[in-house]
Image (tube, rainbow, N blue to C red):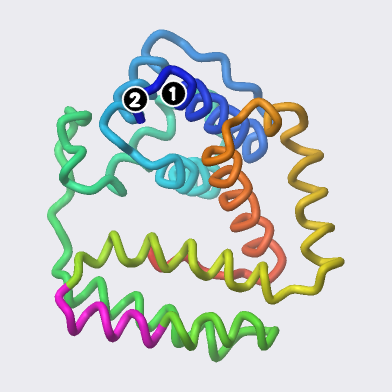
């Protein structure tokens, strides 16, 4: 993400999602700005930062007040290619086969426990893709992040038109004018992350990449 407009949209999108999840506006300190610039320049996807925000909100007793407070929830999710951003030691890597096995168990359980056929159908396809990617020796984290996005898009599209409209109206109400200020790519990613949260809140849809 190199252009000024893309960088601005990246920052605005993370700020907007931080506000949505914490109920607090994000006033960037110099260290927060430096941290976010580092993430942006190193290609850390917005979805990775948003997942870190989600995890921090769920794990901490009090909602985080700034980006530095969520740093430890974001950085372990970043691929080794982005390692120069980080100064703290990374945890020991988990064996790829263990990652695939846990992901497959999660997908199978989600299908079996799904309260709606739309969700069961998505995780049936996810299980197939996990087995296929594992057999092909693919990088698990890249595949699992992509499959998490697939589940959100697939389940959302399978919902009724009224259900989709209601979810999007809720999201637009929370983000307000910020959405109209984003470029198309960042707006799409913001909607994806917000829809992910909405589906999780309604039907406890799990993440494969956690």
Q: Relative to 74, is 207 above or below?
A: below
* Residue 179 place in picture, x, y as percent: 68, 33
Front residue of 102/135: it is: 135
The quadrant where residue 86 appears: top left
Front residue of 136/102: it is: 136
| Viewer-nearest of discs 2 and 1 | 2
* Residue 203 place in picture, x, y as percent: 67, 71
Magenta span has 210? Answer: no
Q: What stretch is highlighted in magenta?
A: 127-137
- Neighbours of disc 2 within 10 Å: few (<14), some (14-19), many (20+): few
Dominant secondary structure (helix, strand or loop) of the stretch shown in magenta: helix
* Residue 119 place in picture, x, y as percent: 61, 80
Task: Say left or right for 135 vs 16.
Answer: left
Q: Relative to 120, is 152 above or below?
A: above
Mark number for residue 2?
2
Look at mark 1 in the image and give the residue it sits on. 7
């Amino acid at each position: 993400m190199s252009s000024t407009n893309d960088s601005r949209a990246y920052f605005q999108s993370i700020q907007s999602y931080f506000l949505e999840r914490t109920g607090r506006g994000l006033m960037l300190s110099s260290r927060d700005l430096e941290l976010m610039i580092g993430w942006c320049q190193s290609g850390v996807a917005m979805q990775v930062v948003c997942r870190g925000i989600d995890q921090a909100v769920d794990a901490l007793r009090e909602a985080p007040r700034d980006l530095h407070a969520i740093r430890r929830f974001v950085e372990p999710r970043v691929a080794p290619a982005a390692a120069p951003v980080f100064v703290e030691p990374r945890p020991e890597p988990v064996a790829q086969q263990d990652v695939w096995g846990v992901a497959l168990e999660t997908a199978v359980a989600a299908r079996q426990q799904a309260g709606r056929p739309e969700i069961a159908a998505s995780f049936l396809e996810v299980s197939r893709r996990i087995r296929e990617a594992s057999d092909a020796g693919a990088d698990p984290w890249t595949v699992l992040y992509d499959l998490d996005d697939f589940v959100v898009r697939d389940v959302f599209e399978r919902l009724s038109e009224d259900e989709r409209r209601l979810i999007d109206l809720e999201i637009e109400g929370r983000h307000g004018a910020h959405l109209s200020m984003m470029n198309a790519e960042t707006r799409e990613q913001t909607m994806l992350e917000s829809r992910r949260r909405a589906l999780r809140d309604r039907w406890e849809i799990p993440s494969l990449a956690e």
